[in-house]
Image: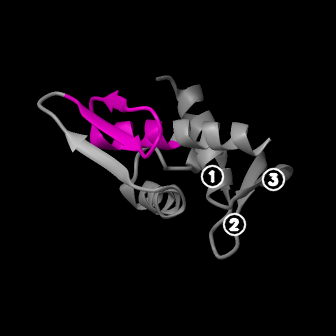
Amino acid sequence: MNKEQVIEGNKLIAEFDGYTFEPDSKLNNIKGVFRKEGKLSMLENELKYHSSWDWLMPVVEKIAFTDGPFRLVFGNCNTYTQFAGHEKIVASSPLLSTWLSVVSYIQQYNQQSK
């Protein structure tokens, strides 16, 4: 997974998490700001869903409370995660597996919402 994929996944999660993307707004003289009431405004490269359980778990909880259970299973070399009724995601770390599952879930959710 490259940096661009991480940024795109984090942007997708941020919008699902209630952030609004304002492409013409500036922060530190750089265009493209994410804003959420009660939170600091930030640039896309400052989103930390891919690297912080503190950022990602509220989104996992939102999905689980909305759409059913979430499974996180640790194996010898890999971890897999799965939201009810969605594909199983296997990765080398629990955080990565969970992040990939959240991105996949939101992509499907957005497709169904159209």
Mark 3 in CB contact with mark 1 (< 8 angstroms): no
Q: Position of residue 82 (x, y in %)?
A: 38, 41
Which badge, 3 or 2, comes first in the chain's sequence? 3
Mark 3 in CB contact with mark 2 (< 8 angstroms): no
Image quadrant in which the C terminus is located? top right
Which badge, 2 or 1, comes first in the chain's sequence? 1
Return the residue at label 2.
36
Question: Which segment did they paint magenta?
Answer: 78-102
Q: Tell whether 78 sits left or right of 9.
A: left
What is the basis of the colouring in this image? one colour
Please state which amino acid type lies under the numbered disc 1: Ala
Q: Which residue is drawn at 59% across and 48% down?
A: 13
Mark 2 in CB contact with mark 1 (< 8 angstroms): yes
Please state which amino acid type lies under the numbered disc 3: Lys
Mark number displayed over residue 26: 3
Please state which amino acid type lies under the numbered disc 2: Lys
Q: Which residue is drawn at 30% across and 35% down?
A: 80
Judging depth in this view, the residue of 30 and 10 nearest the camera is 10
Magenta stretch encompasses residue 25: no
Whether 93 is drawn above or below 56: the answer is above
How crowded pointer 2 is (Cα within 10 Å; few <14, some 14-19, many 20+) is rated as: some
Return the residue at label 1.
14
